[in-house]
């Protein structure tokens, strides 16, 4: 086979998603060198794998440099493409890029020069996969990433921005079916040629939905701007003083990599207004009350303290400077000599009740569990985690627990839970400030300090060394185990459950605790779910703050622009995730932005497929079973009741392509709504009686729907002989109880009066619906008859689509729909699974 023919076939196999074995293809089409007689077969495989990597690398290089020429041309015409060109240049020539000279340069060397004859030891283990990979700093195997990922992400992002800026529409026949790199690059080339005949729309037109970020309080005039080409930062120099003296500081401009050491501060800004003032270079500088007391506590009496504080060292009124400094965050925190994390609490000499008041809006702040009786003889402060951890470590893991060890066990868990009840843990910006520092950050809380790595280690020991459940129950039941009577409220509290999730994430991200699977979260679509429950004052920051967690060239693909609104930022992030995963799987974790806007009475004119990344605690509810008295929203129930067992076959043309105005995808339209009705408010003095009447009425409607289905369609699911079983399923479903949880002890088998009172207010006014084939569900938003119950490839959450009116008589594959709601479907009804799994697959266009 000629080299040209081989490249063509290899292109189809590797880049266009054609099924088949790469190794078998190579062995059947490439002439390999003959191995020496008696050589190790494993070494022969090394040469074969090198040959595969060579072709893969050469094609990626060819595409990358062609892409570079396209981006150069686009940047000449419009500066809004600059961030894409920067990302690609970092991919090609950056420290860990395709052509770098360090460890990652092994990729280039091995892909262009064969190893010594039949010496497999000359090829690093991480390069023996057929994917070309790069190796991160110090050869860390956990930093491996398929080189095709960034190339395809840059291609997808360039397609999206080109369509947006030049206002180009993609027709159905132009949307490629497969996800191959070359196929998508061919689409980009076609669109680039089209753009040459068009003029880019103005930046102001693309920002018509912008909500300017409020900067009230920032009145300080900075003497000079930072040089963005020299990686400059400002460092706050806190001058020495005592508590009764005004706080006086200086701002020094430094080169990030060359001008001495500094500390970095991580803290929660707070929601209060600018009520305090300090002196910066002799001028008044207004800051929030929380920061004022932190600086007061950190100030030395006999020397200058140099520290980087974002609220002061970044000119918050200068959008360009904010963007530049956000791009430097990974370096600012990794270069700092120490990072101080301020969780809360001040020295006793200014520990006023006002300063200690928690944020009542935070779900984490609960009444703290009292100290158990058995802890009275332990002379360690309840907030001193370092001392508690050290004392607990003195006990061997394999010995029986005595009174003191059981008490320490409770105190340690209680302390960790209390630490995690602080607001710092739920802010998105503080997450990177815990992960990025090269040294373990110093955590300061209630006058005590410990290392973040100590908290992680203490939590590991706490979770690993806690007695088994049966042993725990025996201890609690014994007279000697009274100290552990307080354990259960700690372990079942929401802060504790959140802390388990977050500590697991920190263990994956902190350098000292990386796992072998750490590379799996090096993409935006994998970061968003595990950071979903973190909050930001500005919604766009939920995306911008993730820039530092990604490989540098993937981070640069996040367009940081505070002058654009939430919709534009979330639309880009949603499109990137859908394209990257070739599915809309993140719809299982987040609501759609139009839903959030409608619930808050806000206007929304964006695409219906855009996700709202502002906040989601779905991960918590996917890993726990809410107690009956705990609030369960319909949003969470929809995710709980997603289609786990669907046997829908989407065929071999599963593909997603997201343009600014339309989502091309594959899915199954299952059925259409024929009856919809609001769920009543059952708030009378007789909830059981009213609820029973409601369920009886639903059964009557269901029977009518089945009769009409049989008459109109000649089909209806087989009915259960037992109305009792039907009523039971309906009763549980409309109290937001899971079908899978019926056998669990913590779940009531039948709705109680307290459960109805707790759950019905969430559903009152929401729409229940029946479909023409007898399916039943609850919609998150208002729906109409003929709305289509749908499963889209890549997500197990049911969607309700509404066909756009006024379309010309077009084929099914070119008709457009809009998402109008998500839905929970009662799968216990007879025939429901059969109807779902029989739905035909088709191409969808969602606007």
Image (tube, rainbow, N blue to C red):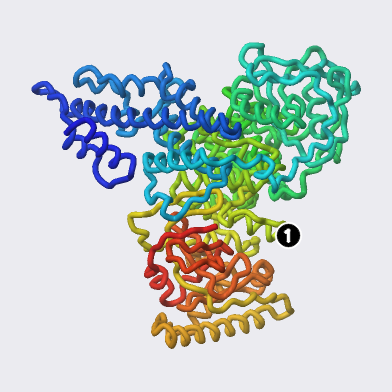
Q: In the rendering, at what x and y percent does residue 186 appear?
A: 39, 41
Mark 1 element type: loop
Left or right: 811 as drawn, with respect to 757: left
For image coordinates 42% across by 50% down, the residue present is: 174
Tally of numbered discs: 1
From this viewpoint, which residue is outermost toward the left? 37
Q: In the rendering, at what x and y percent does residue 549 appear?
A: 55, 33
Q: Quadrant of residue 284?
A: top right
Nearer to me, 163 or 279: 163
The quadrant the C terminus occupies is bottom right
For image coordinates 37% across by 43% down, the residue present is: 183
Q: Is residue 616 above or below residue 133?
A: below
From this viewpoint, which residue is outermost toward the front? 197
Nearer to me, 421 or 665: 665
Q: In the rendering, at what x and y percent does residue 92 appear?
A: 45, 25
For the question of whether residue 479 can be seen, the reply is no
For image coordinates 75% across by 50% down, the residue present is: 361
For the question of whether residue 139 can be seen, the reply is yes
For image coordinates 43% across by 19% down, the residue present is: 100
Estimate how packed mark 1 is, as few (under 14), some (14 to 19) or many (20 or more) residues with alpha carbons within 10 Å.
Answer: few
Left or right: 602 as drawn, with respect to 405: right
Q: In the rendering, at what x and y percent does residue 187 appear?
A: 42, 43
The quadrant the N terminus occupies is top left
Nearer to me, 236 or 809: 809
Q: Is residue 166 above or below residue 341?
A: below
Residue identifier under label 1: 601
Q: Is residue 535 above or below residue 755?
A: above
């Amino acid at each position: 086979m000629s080299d040209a023919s081989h490249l063509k076939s290899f292109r189809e196999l590797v880049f266009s998603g054609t099924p088949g074995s790469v190794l078998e293809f190579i062995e059947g089409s490439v002439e390999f060198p003959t191995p020496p007689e008696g050589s190790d077969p494993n070494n022969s495989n090394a040469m074969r794998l090198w040959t595969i990597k060579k072709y893969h690398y050469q094609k990626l290089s060819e595409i990358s440099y062609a892409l570079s020429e396209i981006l150069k041309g686009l940047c000449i015409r419009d500066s809004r493409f600059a961030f894409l060109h920067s990302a690609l240049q970092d991919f090609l020539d950056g420290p860990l890029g395709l052509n770098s000279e360090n460890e990652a340069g092994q990729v280039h060397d091995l892909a262009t020069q064969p190893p010594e004859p039949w010496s497999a030891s000359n090829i690093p283990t991480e390069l023996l996969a057929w994917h070309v990979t790069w190796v991160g700093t110090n050869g860390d195997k956990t930093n491996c990433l398929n080189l095709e990922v960034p190339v395809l992400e840059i291609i997808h992002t360039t397609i999206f921005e080109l369509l947006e800026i030049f206002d180009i529409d993609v027709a159905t026949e132009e949307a490629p079916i497969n996800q191959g790199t070359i196929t998508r690059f061919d689409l980009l080339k076609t669109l680039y040629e089209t753009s040459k005949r068009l003029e880019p729309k103005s930046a102001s037109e693309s920002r018509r939905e912008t909500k300017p970020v409020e900067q009230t309080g920032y009145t300080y005039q900075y003497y000079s701007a930072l040089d963005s080409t020299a990686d400059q930062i400002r460092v706050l120099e806190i001058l020495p003083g005592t508590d009764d003296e005004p706080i006086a500081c200086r701002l020094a401009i430094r080169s990030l990599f060359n001008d001495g050491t500094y500390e970095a501060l991580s803290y929660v800004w707070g929601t209060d207004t600018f009520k305090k003032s300090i002196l910066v270079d002799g001028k008044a500088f207004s800051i929030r009350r929380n920061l004022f007391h932190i600086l007061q506590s950190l100030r030395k009496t006999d020397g200058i303290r140099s520290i980087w504080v974002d609220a002061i060292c970044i000119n918050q009124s200068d959008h360009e400077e904010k963007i530049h400094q956000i791009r430097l965050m990974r370096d600012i925190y990794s270069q700092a000599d120490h990072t101080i994390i301020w969780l809360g609490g001040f020295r006793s000499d200014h520990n006023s009740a006002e300063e200690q008041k928690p944020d009542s809006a935070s779900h984490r702040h609960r009444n703290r569990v009292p100290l158990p009786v058995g802890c009275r003889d332990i002379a360690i402060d309840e907030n001193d985690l370092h001392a508690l951890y050290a004392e607990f470590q003195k006990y061997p893991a394999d010995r029986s627990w005595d009174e003191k060890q059981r008490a320490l066990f409770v105190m340690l868990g209680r302390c960790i839970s209390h630490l995690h009840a602080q607001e710092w843990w739920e802010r998105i910006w503080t997450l990177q400030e815990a992960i990025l520092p090269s040294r373990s950050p110093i955590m300061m809380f209630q006058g005590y300090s410990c290392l973040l790595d100590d908290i992680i280690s203490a939590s590991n020991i706490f979770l690993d060394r806690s007695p088994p459940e049966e042993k725990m129950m025996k201890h609690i039941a014994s007279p000697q185990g009274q100290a552990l009577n307080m354990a259960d409220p700690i372990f079942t509290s929401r802060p504790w459950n959140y802390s388990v999730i977050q500590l697991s994430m920190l263990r994956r991200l902190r350098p000292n605790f990386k796992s072998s699977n750490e590379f799996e979260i090096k993409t935006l679509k994998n970061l968003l779910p595990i950071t979903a429950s973190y909050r930001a004052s500005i919604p766009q920051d939920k995306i911008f703050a993730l820039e530092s967690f990604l490989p540098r060239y993937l981070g640069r693909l996040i367009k940081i622009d505070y002058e654009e609104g939430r919709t534009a930022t979330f639309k880009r992030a949603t499109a990137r995730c859908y394209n990257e995963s070739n599915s809309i799987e993140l719809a299982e974790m987040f609501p759609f932005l139009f839903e959030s806007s409608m619930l808050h009475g806000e206007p929304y004119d964006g695409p219906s497929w855009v996700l709202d990344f502002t906040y989601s605690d779905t991960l918590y509810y996917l890993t726990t079973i809410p107690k009956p008295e705990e609030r369960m929203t319909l949003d969470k129930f929809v995710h709980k009741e997603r289609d786990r067992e669907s046997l829908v076959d989407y065929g071999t043309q599963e593909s997603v392509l997201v343009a600014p105005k339309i989502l091309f995808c594959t899915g199954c339209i299952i059925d259409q709504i024929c009856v919809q009705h609001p769920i009543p408010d059952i708030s009378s003095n007789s909830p059981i009686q009213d609820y029973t009447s409601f369920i009886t009425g639903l059964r009557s409607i269901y029977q009518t729907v089945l009769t009409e289905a049989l008459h109109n369609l000649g089909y209806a699911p087989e009915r259960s002989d037992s109305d009792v079983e039907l009523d039971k399923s309906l009763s549980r479903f409309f109290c937001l109880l899971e079908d899978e949880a019926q056998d669990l002890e913590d779940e009531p088998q039948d709705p109680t009066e307290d459960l109805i009172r707790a759950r019905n207010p969430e559903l009152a006014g929401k729409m229940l619906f029946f479909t023409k084939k007898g399916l039943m569900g609850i919609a998150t938003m208002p729906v109409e008859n003929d709305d289509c119950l749908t499963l889209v490839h890549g997500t197990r959450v049911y969607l309700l689509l509404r066909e756009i009116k006024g379309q010309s008589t077009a084929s099914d594959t070119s008709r457009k729909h809009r998402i109008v709601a998500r839905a929970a479907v009662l799968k216990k009804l007879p025939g429901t699974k059969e109807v779902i799994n029989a739905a035909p697959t088709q191409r969808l266009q969602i606007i």
